[in-house]
């Protein structure tokens, strides 16, 4: 079972501290599993991520935000197939996230269950970037994939800024490249 929190001091060293500080008084960054109360923060962090990728996200009433809130709420009710891990800041609230979904694919020799994971919505608020918050969320998410979901294949789409983080975990380009088709009606 995945722990409620994954602790890591800001130097990147895991700790067992529950007090909020690690060795030598270094603050501990903790990831926790998202709940339904975190849907608004999840949508906000998704918007930050999309902005950073150059997408036009519109204002707070943009229709995609309500659809995204519904998507998060529905999936958070399926803890066997979905997990989101967040980092809270005592001043700023939720400042980082990593989201994972499980998808059933046809079984094969390298993946007899056919279950595959997908990492998305790895996002950190601008005032807390480069402090290891995304890494702590990703640590917790990958632990969930391995220990609870039983996933052995995990995919993601990386931005240039995030690629080094994912590569440090062993993510690499697949042997067969992924292609994408956008059908009529989708923005190009």
Image (tube, helix red, strand yellow):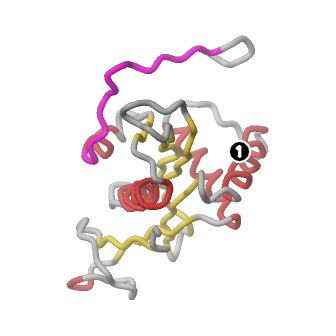
Q: How many residues crowd mark 1 within 10 Å: few (<14), some (14–19), many (20+)?
A: some
The overriding secondary structure of the stretch rendered in magenta is: loop
- Residue 142 falls inside the magenta stretch: no
Locate residue 40, reporting x and y percent.
69, 58
Figure quadrant of residue 22: bottom left
Locate residue 43, reporting x and y percent.
65, 51
Say left or right for 42 vs 59: left
As drawn, the residue found furthest toward the top would be 184
Name the residue located 52 percent from the left edge and 49 percent from the top edge.
100
- Element assignment for label 1: helix
Figure quadrant of residue 162: top left
Locate residue 124, reporting x and y percent.
46, 54
Say left or right for 56 vs 156: right
What range of the chain is rendered magenta? Answer: 168-182
Name the residue located 62 percent from the left edge and 59 percent from the top edge.
79
As drawn, the residue found furthest toward the left would be 24
Circle 1 residue: 68
Locate residue 67, reporting x and y percent.
76, 42
């Amino acid at each position: 079972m995945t722990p409620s929190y994954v602790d890591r001091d800001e130097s990147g060293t895991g700790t067992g501290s529950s007090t909020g500080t690690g060795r030598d008084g270094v603050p501990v960054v903790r990831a926790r599993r998202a709940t339904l109360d975190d849907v608004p923060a999840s949508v906000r962090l998704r918007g930050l991520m999309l902005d950073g990728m150059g997408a036009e996200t519109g204002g707070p009433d943009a229709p995609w935000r309500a659809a995204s809130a519904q998507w998060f709420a529905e999936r958070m009710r399926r803890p066997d197939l979905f997990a989101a891990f967040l980092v809270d800041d005592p001043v700023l609230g939720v400042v980082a996230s990593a989201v994972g979904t499980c998808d059933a694919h046809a079984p094969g020799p390298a993946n007899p269950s056919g279950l595959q994971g997908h990492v998305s919505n790895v996002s950190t608020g601008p005032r807390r970037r480069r402090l290891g918050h995304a890494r702590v969320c990703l640590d917790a998410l990958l632990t969930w994939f391995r220990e609870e979901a039983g996933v052995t294949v995990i995919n993601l789409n990386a931005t240039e800024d995030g690629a080094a983080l994912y590569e440090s975990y062993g993510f690499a380009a697949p042997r067969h490249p992924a292609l994408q088709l956008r059908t009529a009606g989708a923005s190009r």
